[in-house]
Image (cartoon, coloured by chain):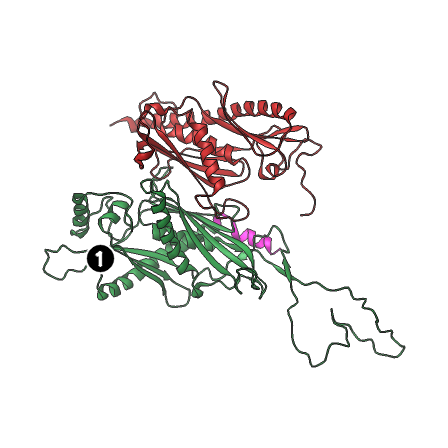
Chain colours: A green, B red
């Protein structure tokens, strides 16, 4: 992982000693497992189906600094039948783009590499079948929705991965899928040679498209005749994206190795929400992406070890279980904020209006 | 949505309810973004642009430095969700490179680069929402960001688009209007009445050009008024909170001045 700032050996050793001391000392006085202030606003991109702007550690009252992510989910229609790239049931594609103003020291090729790394992780985690939303299909085997999740990193002050996944979850929570109605085309029913009814004969009902003569009573197939779809209400934002309780959150556990001089087997110290200098001083970190579906056990959706160094298996096992607790707290806090945002934007009123 | 939208109807109203010469709502936000030296978020109606300025600072690529001036580097990025139809534009997209080169050539004669030899000034433009008047918004936002960063400029640069619908000239066009009528983007330096950018990509009759060019120059001055007001307000607030001026808004800041 390229570090975007340069630090001296003295600074690195100072930060590491502070983290390992008892009580642990960090530059801004936080505890090892304390996060900086997180701000979230949904519905920031009116042209997108769902969007969110999240910042970690931004100075309050219109200050600067902090990590800022802008995420937006946009839906487009795809053909499923071989001509387009669509998949029956819809698909999700995630992309991250890093603004050069977030990384003023990086060259543009290093920036491309970094955004490719982030996109790959986000895409592989969120497009997994276990998280696939059920309502992305329009007409089975003909048309489906492609959901494009685009994230822009506007500023980076450390802990970008946690911010990315939180912003992605918020944008997907906010995403509305327009309601569609399938449309089929009927040929006009004055077929040449229509039967002329003699008096006394039964008046047989003609089924749509087929004359009664061709239709057998044994034919029990139900062939979907829908070839296209329409939006019954142009102004309707739609229904919420299905499975929005499952979108995961990420916890980055940065690892500090105990001082080599200590003889006893002191475990590695893990801390959360690192700033840029801390990330440069302790490059080894463990990314854990958890999903907490309601009424079910938590799922570990993705795990990555980043940076140079080695972790023992026992450490990873302990980290996963403690990471789950931190992720649960993050999950609860994020959900509370998302509900608050929905309230602020009058979502209930809009839903009632849409169903009028 | 069956009926065709009228660009200018009989009552003199445009498709978004404005009059012929009426400009869209302008909002300016000069609060700091990230670690940039200067930044600005400017909206013209529904077009929103964020510009961050870094510099003057040591150049990343020594090959591009000049011995007597600062090098201005402009990079434009468009968010994929900025338009109605999502389109991912790579950094090397020709339209984007052209826009960046246009912004650079607009500001080269305006920024006092001779004060900072062998250094670099980076201008990063991030387009958040597009609804017509993109180049105009980028130039106005860049002016604000440069002023916010404290980089010496000879004058403000204020840009506006103008177009002609049959014989009626119009100002500050939306996307709908830009797709329909010939239009030109003009950037002026209001104090000296000098024009630093004129660009047109559609066909416009020569007899119409003079009128629309003159109008756009006047509209640039109106935008200059807005930009000046925003910068003055922000500077006043900063100076007041630094406590180094006589209190402008009454005595609430008394406590802050007692060190």
Question: Which residue is situated farthest in the right direction here?
Answer: A199
**Residue B2 or residue A23, whichever sits in front:** B2
How many labels were placed on the picture? Answer: 1
**Residue A261 or residue B76, whichever sits in front:** B76
Question: Which residue is situated farthest in the top direction here?
Answer: B192
Q: Secondary structure at mark 1?
A: loop
Question: Which residue is situated farthest in the bottom direction here?
Answer: A218
**Residue A6 location, x and y as percent?**
24, 43
**Residue B167 location, x and y as percent?**
68, 28
Could you say which quadrant of the image residue A57 lies in?
Answer: top left
Q: From where the camera sits, is residue A92 visible?
A: yes
Quick one: quadrant of the C terminus of chain A?
Answer: bottom right
Q: Is residue A241 magenta?
A: no
Q: Is residue A32 left or right of residue A190?
A: left
Q: Chain of mark 1?
A: A
Q: Is residue B72 left or right of residue A11?
A: right
Rendered position, A41 above or below A143: above
Give the class, few, some or many, for how many residues have Cα within 10 Å of label 1's Cα (few <14, many ≥20).
Answer: few
Q: Which residue is mark 1?
A: A309
**Residue A284 location, x and y as percent?**
24, 55
Q: Which residues are magenta?
A: A343-356
The residue at 50%/34% (across/down) is B135
Could you say which quadrant of the image residue A269 lies in?
Answer: bottom left
Q: Is residue B20 left or right of residue B82?
A: right
**Residue A209 location, x and y as percent?**
74, 69
Q: From where the camera sits, is residue B251 visible?
A: no
**Residue A117 or residue A244, whichever sits in front:** A117
The residue at 37%/48% (across/down) is A112
The residue at 28%/45% (across/down) is A276
Q: Is residue A345 magenta?
A: yes
Dominant secondary structure (helix, strand or loop) of the stretch shown in magenta? helix
């Amino acid at each position: 992982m390229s570090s975007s700032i340069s630090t001296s050996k003295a600074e690195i050793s100072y930060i590491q000693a502070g983290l390992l001391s008892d009580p642990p000392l960090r530059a801004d006085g936080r505890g090892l497992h304390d996060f900086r202030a997180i701000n979230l606003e949904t519905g920031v991109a009116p042209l997108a189906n769902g969007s969110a702007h999240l910042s970690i550690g931004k100075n309050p009252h219109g200050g600067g600094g902090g990590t800022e992510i802008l995420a937006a989910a946009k839906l487009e229609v795809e053909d499923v039948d071989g001509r387009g790239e669509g998949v029956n049931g819809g698909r999700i594609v995630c992309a991250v783009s890093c603004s050069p103003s977030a990384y003023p020291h990086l060259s543009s090729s290093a920036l491309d590499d970094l955004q490719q790394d982030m996109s790959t992780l986000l895409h592989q985690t969120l497009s997994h079948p276990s998280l696939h939303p059920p309502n992305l299909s329009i007409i089975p085997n003909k048309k489906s929705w492609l959901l494009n999740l685009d994230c822009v990193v506007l500023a980076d002050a450390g802990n970008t991965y946690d911010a990315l996944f939180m912003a992605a979850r918020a944008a997907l929570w906010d995403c509305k899928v327009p309601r569609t109605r399938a449309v089929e085309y009927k040929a006009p029913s004055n077929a040449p040679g229509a039967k002329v009814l003699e008096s006394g004969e039964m008046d047989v009902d003609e089924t749509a498209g087929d004359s009664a003569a061709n239709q057998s009573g044994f034919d029990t197939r139900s062939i979907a005749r829908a070839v296209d779809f329409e939006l019954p209400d142009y102004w309707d934002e739609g229904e919420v994206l299905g499975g929005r309780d499952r979108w995961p959150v990420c916890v980055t556990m940065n690892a500090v190795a105990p001082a080599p001089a200590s003889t006893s087997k002191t475990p590695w110290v893990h801390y959360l929400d690192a700033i840029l200098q801390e990330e440069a001083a302790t490059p080894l970190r463990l990314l854990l992406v958890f999903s907490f579906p309601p009424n079910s056990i938590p799922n570990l959706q993705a795990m990555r070890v980043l940076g140079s160094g080695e972790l023992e298996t026992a450490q990873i096992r302990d980290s996963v279980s403690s990471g789950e607790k931190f992720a649960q707290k993050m999950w609860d806090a994020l959900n509370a904020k998302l509900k608050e945002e929905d309230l602020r934007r009058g979502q209930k009123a809009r839903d009632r209006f849409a169903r009028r | 949505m069956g009926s065709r939208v009228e660009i200018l109807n009989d009552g003199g109203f445009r498709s978004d309810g404005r009059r012929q010469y009426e400009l869209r709502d302008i909002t300016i936000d000069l609060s700091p973004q990230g670690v940039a030296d200067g930044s600005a978020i400017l909206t013209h109606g529904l077009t929103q642009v964020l510009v961050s300025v870094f510099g003057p600072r040591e150049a990343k690529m020594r090959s591009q430095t000049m011995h007597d001036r600062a090098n201005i580097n402009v990079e434009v990025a468009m968010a994929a969700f900025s338009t109605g139809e999502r389109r991912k534009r790579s950094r090397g997209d020709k339209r984007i490179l052209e826009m960046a080169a246009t912004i650079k050539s607009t500001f080269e004669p305006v920024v006092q680069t001779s004060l900072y030899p062998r250094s670099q000034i980076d201008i990063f433009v991030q387009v958040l929402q597009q609804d017509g008047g993109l180049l105009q918004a980028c130039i106005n936002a860049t002016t604000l960001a440069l002023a916010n960063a404290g980089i010496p400029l000879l004058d403000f640069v204020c840009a506006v688009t103008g177009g002609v619908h049959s014989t009626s000239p119009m100002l500050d066009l939306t996307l709908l209007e830009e797709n329909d009528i010939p239009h030109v983007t003009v950037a002026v330096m209001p104090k000296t009445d000098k024009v630093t950018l004129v660009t047109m990509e559609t066909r416009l009759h020569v007899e119409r050009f003079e009128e629309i060019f003159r109008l756009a120059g006047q509209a640039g001055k109106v935008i200059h008024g807005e930009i000046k007001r925003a910068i003055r307000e922000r500077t006043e607030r900063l100076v007041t909170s630094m406590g180094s001026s006589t209190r402008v808004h009454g005595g609430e800041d008394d406590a802050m001045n007692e060190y």
